[in-house]
Amino acid sequence: MKNKGVIFDIEYAWGALQKICEASEYIEPILDIRVLSDDEVGRYLHRGRLRMDVALKLFQRSGYFVHLQHFDYRMGFKGANALMSKTSGHSPEFLIVAHHDYCAGVGAEDNASGLAVLVALAEALRETSHPVAFASFDLEEIGLFGSKHFVNCFGSDVSKRFPVVIALDCIGSGKDVVVCKKVWGAESDSELIDNFQKAASRQLGETFTVGSFDYFNSDHVPFAQRGSRTMHITSCDYEAALAGGDAFTEDDCRSDGSVAHTKFDIPERIRIENLKKVGEALCAFIEETKLEHFA
């Protein structure tokens, strides 16, 4: 097992998660955001923006350029995405993404867990030359509204600008961290998964479960549809949960341990070892992988 050159600071990630959740109002599970009244939509967007702003301050503290992108959601309401990179240029980069809106509890699992790992990865990579950018998307919970807008802005060039896109969504509360083979019809790139697994094994002695389920959506899907090589990491093992008949239980966590979309989506249910495993594995992958190979 090799020593890693880039160090992922799990305490930094945990602190970021706490800050994001402290800025988040507790809400009862929202089953369908699309049917909310105008007043409720305004509050929903405001809550997500507060979380994004916490993350952006941490990115800026680590020296990243922040590019905000506002877009129309419905009449009178705008969503907001953010792209964070170490340069203001337009060279190809790995893109690691998460969403900042949430629909239950304080969104610790869904998706402060993904945002926190993004922030800590940015800090770990700040002094390196690795071509990595990060993005935070709005309105994921209504069908990837923010990430679809982001991809549409880049058009046919999105796969050239971001040849590799990795989505982190609900990585904190499940008993196992899972790499999804397929999400919403979008196939994860098999070579990308293989490189990720090999880097995690060589540097950390870790392996990841690779799931075959296709039961939910995630922000990498619009990129996959435009030709980027993508991968999705989660800890919500819906395949196992559906087998147990409890995939959408709101009264408690599911059999796989996940609490996304339940009233228990709070920091106390987050497994810090999940965040550590994902963050360290991504550092190992980025260190070992040449972007040109996938471009």
Image (cartoon, rainbow, N blue to C red):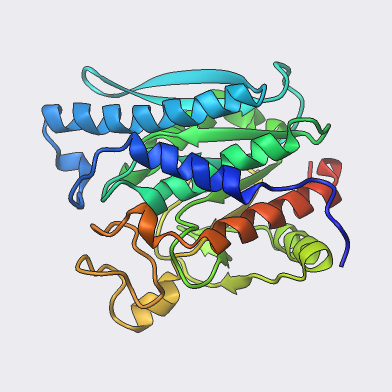
User: Along the line of sight, which residue is nearer the eye, 262 or 82?
Assistant: 262
Q: Percent position (x, y) of residue 68? A: 50, 19
* Residue 67 sits in quarter: top right
The quarter of the image holding the N terminus is bottom right
User: Along the line of sight, which residue is nearer the eye, 93 or 27?
Assistant: 27
Residue that sits furthest to the bottom in the current view: 244
Q: Percent position (x, y) of residue 70? A: 41, 19
Residue that sits furthest to the right in the current view: 2
In-image side of 23 versus 119 (left or right):
left
Q: Is residue 101 above or below residue 232?
A: above
User: Along the line of sight, which residue is nearer the eye, 227 or 183?
Assistant: 183
Q: Residue at x 66, y 36 (%)?
A: 122
Q: Percent position (x, y) of residue 229? A: 67, 49
Q: Is residue 28 above or below residue 207?
A: above
In-image side of 288 versus 218 (left or right):
right
The number of discs equals 0
Q: Percent position (x, y) of residue 239? A: 43, 75
Q: Residue at x 57, y 20 (%)?
A: 66
Q: Is residue 9 above or below residue 40?
A: below
In-image side of 142 versus 32 (left or right):
right
Q: Is residue 226 visible?
A: no
Q: Is residue 101 above or below residue 90?
A: below
Q: Residue at x 79, y 41 (%)?
A: 295
Q: Residue at x 52, y 24 (%)?
A: 57
Q: Is residue 273 visible?
A: yes
